[in-house]
Image (cartoon, rainbow, N blue to C red):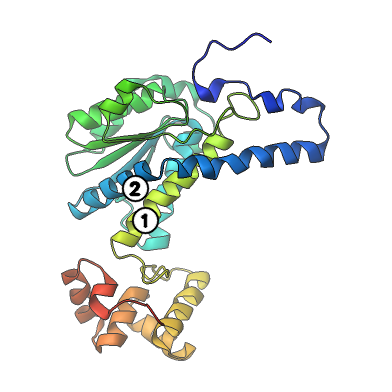
């Protein structure tokens, strides 16, 4: 078999799947599952770099800055997905974590493959969002070569932002020197050659979930392991909010309902109101003084 001349790991042929078109259905399932098991281990190898990205994100938030994910295709969609889940899960301002995808919103539902080739469009996206010194911009490109992403990161650095790069192939020395952090989980060649929506996409989602979740924990959005900064906006979240209050405060459901109503549907505020005997405004002031950390206001959840 002639070897590929492309040095990118994401473009190599996987020797274990070269006859996948001749396998039975269950054999295809088993093969894909076996390959997927490698992903978490590859992400674990990058644990220190992921932690560095978390610290950069938290530092940005504490300075009043933002986290931007920038990508194209699957990478861009995963960035937008992670960013869009922050407001409903942690009651963040939609501007705090933003996903930027080549081709704009239309690229979320229909491929805009040519959009990734224009570095100047990535730079323009940073200008339009007024990226600055307090922000952290994480570029995502499984192959490590997407011009749109490189253009965005170059402009972000010029504007004073700190930058990172997430890829699933061997990073070049130049890439390592250009950014504050480089995360490179080496998941190996895909089952279908070049189909980075598979293992590379899974690794990307794991990394982004870890960065955003840990950043929310470290900025006071979590109490114990409960998402207490959620805002009650639907029946599911109403039920979850009531159960969180019942568990953390030892109260009945009807009491939790009244407390949630008095807090404007804000679970973290309701906990502080109950624990300190304050109204909503007083509780909000206490949280503001503590930088949003509920544990600093009412003590931690250990032993409850």
Q: Residue at x 30, y 21 (%)?
A: 174
Q: Which residue is mark 1?
A: 214
Can residue 106 be seen in the rendering of this structure? Answer: no
Earlier residue among tags 1 and 2? 2
Q: Position of residue 51 (x, y in %)?
A: 34, 48
Q: Position of residue 199 (x, y in %)?
A: 57, 36
Q: Which residue is mark 2?
A: 51
Q: 70 or 280: which is nearer to us?
A: 70
- The image quarter containing residue 118 is top left
Can residue 289 be seen in the rendering of this structure? Answer: yes
Q: Are marks 1 and 2 in contact (CB under 8 Å)?
A: yes
Q: Is residue 208 above or below residue 6?
A: below
Callout 1: helix, strand or loop? helix
Q: Is residue 106 above or below residue 13?
A: below
Residue at mark 1 to residue at mark 2: CA–CA distance: 9 Å
Callout 2: helix, strand or loop? helix
Q: Is residue 271 above or below residue 134?
A: below
């Amino acid at each position: 078999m002639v070897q590929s001349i492309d040095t990118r790991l994401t473009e190599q042929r996987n020797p274990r799947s070269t006859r996948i078109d001749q396998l039975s259905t269950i054999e295809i399932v088993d093969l894909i599952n076996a390959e997927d098991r490698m992903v978490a281990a590859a992400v674990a190898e990058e644990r220190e770099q992921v932690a560095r990205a978390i610290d950069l994100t938290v530092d940005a938030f504490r300075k009043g800055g933002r986290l931007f994910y920038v990508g194209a295709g699957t990478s861009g969609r995963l960035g937008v997905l992670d960013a869009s889940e922050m407001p409903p899960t942690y009651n963040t301002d939609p501007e705090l974590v933003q996903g930027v995808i080549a081709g704009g919103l239309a690229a979320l539902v229909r491929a805009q493959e040519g959009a990734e080739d224009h570095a100047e469009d990535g730079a323009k996206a940073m200008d339009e969002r007024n990226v600055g010194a307090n922000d952290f911009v994480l570029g995502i490109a499984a192959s490590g070569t997407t011009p749109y992403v490189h253009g965005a990161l170059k402009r972000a650095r010029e504007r004073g932002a700190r930058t990172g790069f997430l890829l699933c192939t061997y990073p070049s020395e130049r890439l390592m020197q250009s950014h504050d952090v480089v995360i490179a989980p080496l998941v190996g060649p895909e089952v279908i050659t070049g189909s980075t929506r598979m293992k590379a996409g899974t690794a990307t989602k794991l990394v982004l979930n870890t960065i955003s979740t840990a950043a929310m924990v470290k900025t006071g959005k979590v109490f114990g392991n409960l998402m207490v900064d959620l805002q009650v906006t639907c029946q599911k979240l109403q039920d979850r909010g009531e159960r969180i209050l019942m568990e953390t405060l030892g109260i009945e459901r009807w009491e939790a309902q009244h407390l949630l109503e008095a807090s404007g549907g804000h679970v973290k505020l309701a906990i502080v109101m109950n624990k300190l005997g304050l109204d909503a405004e007083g509780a909000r002031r206490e949280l503001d003084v503590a930088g949003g950390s509920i544990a600093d206001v009412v003590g931690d959840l250990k032993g409850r």
